[in-house]
Amino acid sequence: MIKLDTQILELRSPAKLNLFLHIIGRRSDGYHLLQSVFQLIDWCDVVTLKLIPENEVRRTHPIPGVAPEDDLVVRAAKLLKDFSGVQSGVEIGLKKEIPMGAGLGGGSSDAASTLIGLNALWNLNLDKPTLSTLGLKLGADVPFFIFGKNAFVEGIGEEIQEISLKTQDFLVLFPNRGIATASIFQDPELTRDHAPITIDGFLASPNLEQSNDCQAVAVRICPEVKQALDWIGQAVPGSAPRMSGSGSSVFAVLDPKIDSANLQNLLQNLPKGWVGRIVRGLNKNPAYNLISSE
C-alpha cells in the first residue's frame, strides 16, 4: 500500500455494468446464487476524504433524503474506524454523478473508495482480503470495487475472479426511476435456475451470454425499463440492449464505427429526467494503486 503523508485525498469511484446476470440457484438462507461479469466504466462519483483533529466522522453536504445511518460512505468510515480503533477523524465529501438506484453500483463504489482511501490516509496497512471482508458488511458489490479489476463474479457476489475484457464503449441510460433490489429478488416469477457457465465459456462466446435474469421482472414492474430498452433499440439498431444489475439502467455495447456525434445529439433529447451517457470500459478502479495487492 502507498504510504501517504497528506491530510486530504480525492478518489474517483467508478460505476460498473453487469455484462450478464444469471441466477443459478438459491441458498437455504434465501440469498440468491449469481453469476455475472462486472465491467468497470468511466462514469464516476468523486469521494473526498479530509483528516480532521476531531475524533469523528463528518459528512459535508449530505444527500437529501438519505439519513446518515443509511449513507454508505459514512457507514464505511465508521466501520473502518471501529475495526481499527484509530483515534483520528475524517470529513467526507461526495460529488454524485452516478444515479442512485440505477443498478450501476455507485453507492458500493463510494463505500469501497472510502475504505481504500482511509486505509491509506490513516496508514492502517490493512490488506485487500481484510478490507473486502469489511466491505461485504456494507453490500454485496463492495468487495468487487475493492478488488479493483473487471471480474467474473459468483456466489452472492463474494467469489471474484479477474477477467480480461477488451476495451469497449457503451451507451448507458437511466430512465429516472430506481427499482428496489428486494422487489426483484422476491418476485415469484424470477428465474432462479439458469444453467451455470464458466469463464472460458463466456470468453469463447460472450455474445451468447448477454441475458439478465432480472430483466423480465423489472420490465413488468417498471415500464420505464422497457421504454429505455426500446429507446436504445431505435437509436442503435442491432445493439442488443439489456439491463444492468437489478435495474433500472440499461445499456448497449457500441460498435466502433457508430456515428457518436449523432448519438450525442440524440442524447440531448431524452425524455425529461432521463440520464444518458456514452462511457468507456476501464480495466482498473482508479483507486486500485492505493491498496496492497495482497
Image: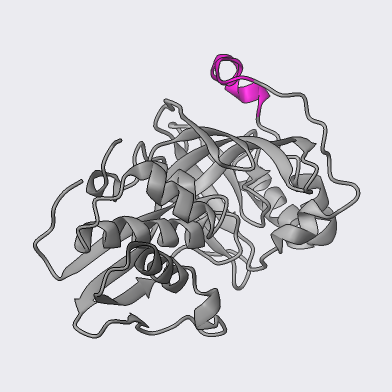
What's the magenta region?
Answer: 198-209
The C terminus - image quarter: top left
Work out whether residue 270 or residue 166 is closer to the camera in this orientation and state it.
Answer: 166
Is residue 28 shown in magenta?
no
Q: Is residue 20 left or right of residue 29?
A: left
Percent x, y for residue 62?
44, 83
Q: Residue 44 at what x, y percent from top left?
A: 39, 58
Give the number of callouts. 0
The residue lying at 35 percent from left, 83 percent from top is 60
Between 43 and 1, which is closer to the camera in this rendering? Answer: 1
Residue under the image location 24 percent in, 75 percent down:
88
The scheme the figure's colours follow is one colour
Residue 37, image quadrant: top right
The correct choice, above or below, for 118 with respect to 247 in the image is below
Question: In the image, is residue 66 above or below residue 218?
Answer: below
Q: Position of residue 254 (x, y in %)?
A: 50, 37
What secondary structure do most residues of the magenta stretch adopt?
Answer: helix
Q: Is residue 101 above or below residue 34?
A: below
